Image: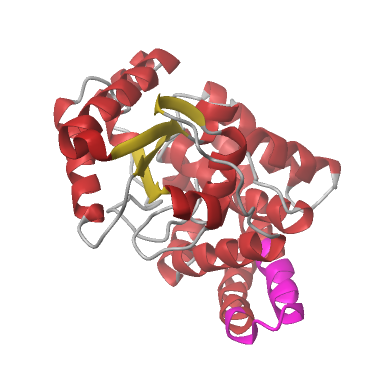
Amino acid sequence: MYAPNATLPIGNMSCHTNKPSEKIRQADMSTATADQVVADTVEAAETVFGTEIEAVYTLGSLAHGGFTPLVSDVDVAIVLGSTGPDTANRIASVQGLVVEKATSPLSERLSLFWADWHAVRTGEGDHFRLGPVDRLDLLDSGRLLLGSDRRGPSVRPSHEDLVLMSADLMLTKFTEGYFEQLRDTDALVAGGPRAVTKAILFPVRFMYTLRTGRIGLNDGSARWYAAEALPGSALALEALEWRNDGISDVELAVQMVDADLATLHAECLAEYTKCLDGLGEALRAAALAERAGCVHLVVEDVR
């Protein structure tokens, strides 16, 4: 999922080599293990919040399909009667209980979102983690696990809301250090399918949202990207295979990432910069243009 209004400590896309124990854990992963994480989350949420809970939903690929154990996060949204300055810390306690219990190798992939009903329906409030993209996902695809469903009627996020949120996430994630990682494609691929497919599909999903005004799901976004014949289409489609089956030919993967990963990012940043200029978002546009300059350095290095 995308960036939040408020944040928990969430891992970045740093590259790290697979350890033997990690490979063993990947072999044990299944949708059932994700379901166990969800069950542990509901239990932990009830422990921390009790009767304050109004509803609990799964989001993302667990809700609308496309979950793959090798790479997917376990996205859960908790709707509370009210939220306040201490809610983020209490949510962190929920996450801590799930990680501590560790009944599944996916426990550390848990990503928690939270809001009250007003924030769910309007996107307004001060103490919640449910940005426009994630809120739209909850409204359209959230799968109710606990409580009552009171999502509608709601004010749906606009195309501009989705674009601005995506731009802000890019400004947060696409740092100089991130682009340094793109240069070291051997390490990126060695980090396994989770690291490399996220690096590939993030810009693809952002492009889908920009062009269509809809949530960029991995499978649909990559296939749309290829149908549009945008730069790096072959790499986007290959990432879908790696998400499901892992990377069998490391040398070929490195070659494909070398050839097109930086180009994917450059295309995405250029289109968002142009769109933001048109929306009168001069500061965001200038910041993204600066990031695009870093990508062009990466492209030149690859060439």
Q: Position of residue 197 (x, y in %)?
A: 54, 40
Residue bounds of the magenta highlight: 268-284
Q: Position of residue 63 (x, y in %)?
A: 53, 28
Q: Can residue 48 be seen in this snapshot?
A: yes
Query: In terms of depth relative to the viewer, which is nearer, 119 or 259?
Result: 119
Q: Quadrant of residue 5?
A: bottom left
Q: Quadrant of residue 292?
A: bottom right
As for residue 69 lying within the magenta part, the answer is no
Q: Position of residue 287 (x, y in %)?
A: 56, 80
Compared with 196, 184 (above or below) is: below
Q: Residue at x 58, y 85 (%)?
A: 283
Q: Can residue 259 be seen in this snapshot?
A: no
Q: How is the image coloured?
A: secondary structure
Q: Position of residue 177 (x, y in %)?
A: 40, 67
Query: In terms of depth relative to the viewer, which is nearer, 79 or 20?
Result: 79
Compared with 108, 168 (above or below) is: below
Query: In terms of depth relative to the viewer, which is nearer, 118 or 182?
Result: 118
| Furthest residue in direction right, as rendered | 228
So how many labels did they put on this image? 0
Q: Residue at x 62, y 38 (%)?
A: 140
Q: Residue at x 39, y 50 (%)?
A: 115
Q: Relative to 181, is 215 on the left or the right?
A: right
Q: Relative to 210, is 296 on the left or the right?
A: left
- Image quarter hosting the C terminus: bottom right
Query: In terms of depth relative to the viewer, which is nearer, 250 or 281?
Result: 281
Q: Residue at x 44, y 58 (%)?
A: 181
As for residue 277 lying within the magenta part, the answer is yes
Question: Main SS of the magenta segment?
Answer: helix
